[in-house]
Amino acid sequence: ISDGYVNPRVAKYDKNGDWVKSWGEKGTGPGQFRLPHAIAVDRNNNVYVGDRSNRRIQVFDTNGKFLRMFSIDVPPPPDTKPVYGNTPSGAARAATIGAPNSMCITPGPNQVMFVGESTFPGRLFKVSLDGKVLGVIGRSGRQLKQFSGAHQIACPSDTEIYTAETANWRVQKLMLRP
């Protein structure tokens, strides 16, 4: 469980719901978090934690040993506007780019990750498990294939994605071409 709003940590429970352990503390170093907001596990039991306020994804083994981290640094087009409010600039704009608000990892032998930004710039990213950006989907907005507050993502296959958006109060189903 990514426990970000109260405690900057990951909590591990067993299959019966009993607490096993936790790891992480507030900070910006490896193994530390500011807002662990998303979590996913690959087929090799690597745990990916989206630390939104640190703009990075950290990878751990199931015992909490830090393995690596990566960031998504894809600037939005200069004319990108948020769904509501003023367009952030300077440090506030930089803090939003690639900040992982939600994520999922596809099943199957060639796993990839889909990561959703928050309300601005509001995109989805297709990312390899080593952190390489493979594609960018959408932009901030209210129309179909536009996003704002992709708070959860499900990817039951390599070509099917569901996003639940808080700012747009909807779920979108996306079908990607293989």
Image (cartoon, rainbow, N blue to C red):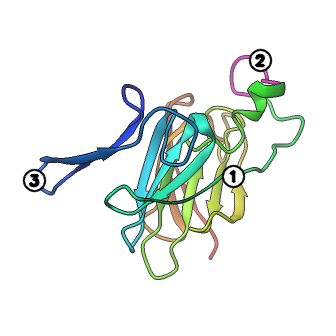
Query: Is residue 93 in the magenta section?
Result: no
Q: Main secondary structure of the magenta part?
A: loop
Question: Is residue 138 among the parts visible in the rendering?
Answer: yes
* Residue depicted at 61% across the width and 68% down the height: 128
In this view, the mark in front (2 or 1): 1
Left or right placement of residue 77 versus residue 36 in this view: right
**Front position in the image: 63 or 159:** 63
Q: Which callout, 2 or 3, points at the residue further toward the start of the chain?
A: 3
Query: Is residue 85 in the magenta section?
Result: yes
* Residue depicted at 56% across the width and 51% down the height: 57
Q: Split into 4 quadrants, where in the image is the C terminus?
A: bottom right
Q: Residue furthest top?
A: 85
Amino acid at dot 3: Asn
What is the number of the mark on residue 72? 1
Label 1: few (<14), some (14–19) or many (≥20) C-alpha neighbours in 10 Å: some
Image quadrant assignment for residue 42: bottom left
In the rendered image, which residue does mark 3 sit on?
16
Is 164 situated above or below 128?
above
Q: Which callout, 2 or 1, points at the residue further toward the start of the chain?
A: 1
* Residue depicted at 60% across the width and 47% down the height: 56
What x and y, as percent, mark residue 129? 56, 68
Amino acid at dot 1: Ile
What x and y, as percent, mark residue 84? 69, 20
Question: Is residue 11 among the parts visible in the rendering?
Answer: no
In the rendered image, which residue does mark 2 sit on?
86
Query: Which span of residues is magenta-colored?
Result: 82-89
What is the number of the mark on residue 95? none
